[in-house]
Image (tube, rainbow, N blue to C red):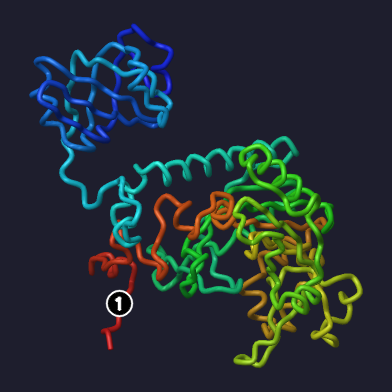
Amino acid sequence: MQRILSNQVNDLVGKSVMMQGWAQTVRAHAKVVFIDLRDRTGLTQLVITGELVEQAKGITNESVITINGTVTERPQSLINANIASGKVEVQVKEVSVETVAEPLPFPLTEEKVSEEVRLKYRYLDIRRKKLSDNLRARSAANEFIRTFLLKKDFVEVETPYISKSTPEGARDYLVPSRIEPGKFYALPQSPQQYKQLLMVAGLERYFQIARCFRDEDSRGDRQPEFTQLDLEMSFTNRDEVMELIEDLFTSLVKKLFPEKAFTFDRFPRLKYADTIKEYNSDKPDLRKDKSNDDELAFAFVVDFPLFEWKESEKRYDATHHPFTSPTPEFEDNFEKKPKEALSLQYDLVLNGSEIAGGSIRIHKPEVLERVFSFMGHSKEGIQAKFGHLLEAFRYGVPPHGGIAPGLDRLYTILLKEESIRDVIAFPKTGDGHDLLMNAPSDVDEAQLKELGLQLRPKK
C-alpha cells in the first residue's frame, strides 16, 4: 500500500491508508491510545483501541512508526482547528515500531532551550516546526532565485572549493596538499576571480548559490562558512546590476512573503558620504516603523571611497576589494588622489544590515596592476598571486561587474529571526565551533605525517 501523508488524509474519509512518521505525542488511557503522527507535511491524530492498546502503550514520544488504518471524520465537538487534518483521524488496525526513541535531551515543545543544546542536537532541533519551516522557506526562495535568473539567460556554474590562497580581505582557511607537502590550497572567501574568468570565457551571465569560507573573528551575523548568491555580468553597468537585484528581490518578496510591506516603491540610491553624515552608518535602517518586522526598507549605497587607510600597516587598502573599478574620473589619477578617489562599488542594505556588496570590476590589466602596486604589492608578488588573472585579461576581457547578496542575512530578516543560525541547517557557534560534530578536533599523527606537517607544542 502506498504511503499517505498528513496533508492528504482529509480527502480520504472511509479509505484504508498506510502512514509513517514520528510519534510526536503519545496519550495513553485505559482503553484507548491517541498518537499525533508527524510527517513532513504536518500532524494526523491516530486512534488505537482493542488488542493494540498494550502494544501502543510501549511507544515512546518521537519513536518512528508505521500504521495501517481507516480515515474517519471526527465528531464536530472534537475537531482540532489548529492542524490541517483536524477534521479527521485514523482508526488504527495495525501498528509496527520501526525504531524506539529514548528520552530526548530536551522537549521539542519547549521554546526556551539554550542555543548550545540546540546546536549539539541539531537533528532534533530541526524536527521542531519553526526551524523546519525556515529551511523549507529557504529552499523555496533558492528555487525562486534560480528560476528567475535562468529565465534572464544566466548560466549556473559551480566553481572550485579548493584553490589558491590570495589576499581578499579576510584570513583564508588553508588545506594542506598531500601530493606536494608544504604547499596549500585555500577554501574560497568568494568565487571572485573564477567568476571574472568566466566573463573572459564569454559566458556573459553567470550565477551560483555559492558556499564561501572566511576565517574571521566571531560576530553575530557571520559564520565561518556562509552562502551567497554570486552573479556576474559582461557588458554591464552599475545601474543594470542594481535594477536586476531590485527586480529579483521585489519579485521574491511579493511571491513568497506577501505579508511584507516595502518602505519605498523603488530602492533608493544613497551616496556613501551622505549616509555617513546623516546616519553615522553605511547600512542605515530606513524603516518608518522600526518595531514592525514586516516592513522592508531596501536601499542601495553608492559612491564608496576606492581606498581606506590602514594605520597599522601604513598603507592604503581597497575598501571593497582590489578588483573594484574606480569611477572614470579617477581611473588615471587615483594614486595622486587616494583620499578623494571614488569607486563603482554598490552595497544593498535592508533594515540596518548589509545584505549585498558588488561593483563594476577593473577589466584593463594595466589599471589592475597599478591598483595592486599602489596597495603595496611588489611586481613579483603581483605575478605570484594574480598572474593567472592578469594573463587571462590580456586575451580579451569584456567590461563586467556583479554583486553577491548574502542569503543567510537576507533570509534571517525575511523570516524575522534574530540570528543567522536559525536559517542554517547545521551552523557553527559564534566562535566557530561545530557542537554537533565536535569540530575543530584533533587528527591522527599518521594524517599529519602523510601531509608533511608537524604541530608545535602548545605554549
Q: Residue furthest top?
A: 14
Is residue 21 something one can see in this rendering? yes
Residue at 30% x, 77% y is 454
Quadrant of the drawing holding the N terminus:
top left
x and y, in percent, of residue 107 in the image: 26, 48
Q: Looking at numbered disc 1 in the image, what kind of residue is underneath it?
A: Gln
Q: Residue at x 54, y 62 (%)?
A: 188
Instruction: Identify the residue under disc 1.
Output: 454
Quadrant for the C terminus in the image: bottom left
Counting labels gives 1
Image height of 339 relative to 355, above or below:
below
Q: Residue at x 54, y 54 (%)?
A: 412
Residue 336 sits in which quadrant?
A: bottom right
Q: Nearer the viewer, residue 322 or 116?
A: 116
Q: Is residue 348 left or right of residue 331?
A: left
Residue 41 visible in this rendered orientation of the protein: no
Q: Is residue 225 left or right of residue 55?
A: right
Instruction: Reply above or below: 177 against 311.
Output: above
Q: Position of residue 207 (x, y in %)?
A: 66, 47
> Residue 134 at what x, y percent from top left?
48, 45
Q: Seen in the image, is 363 located left or right of residue 358?
A: right
Mark 1 element type: loop
Front position in the image: 145 or 181: 145
Near mark 1 (Cα within 10 A), the count class, few <14, some 14-19 or many ≥20, is: few
Q: Is residue 427 above or below residue 3?
A: below
Residue visible at 36% across and 18% down in the picture: 88
Q: Nearer the viewer, residue 17 or 458?
A: 17
In screen coordinates, is 91 left or right of 56? right
Q: Residue furthest front?
A: 77
Quarter of the image for residue 321 reads: bottom right
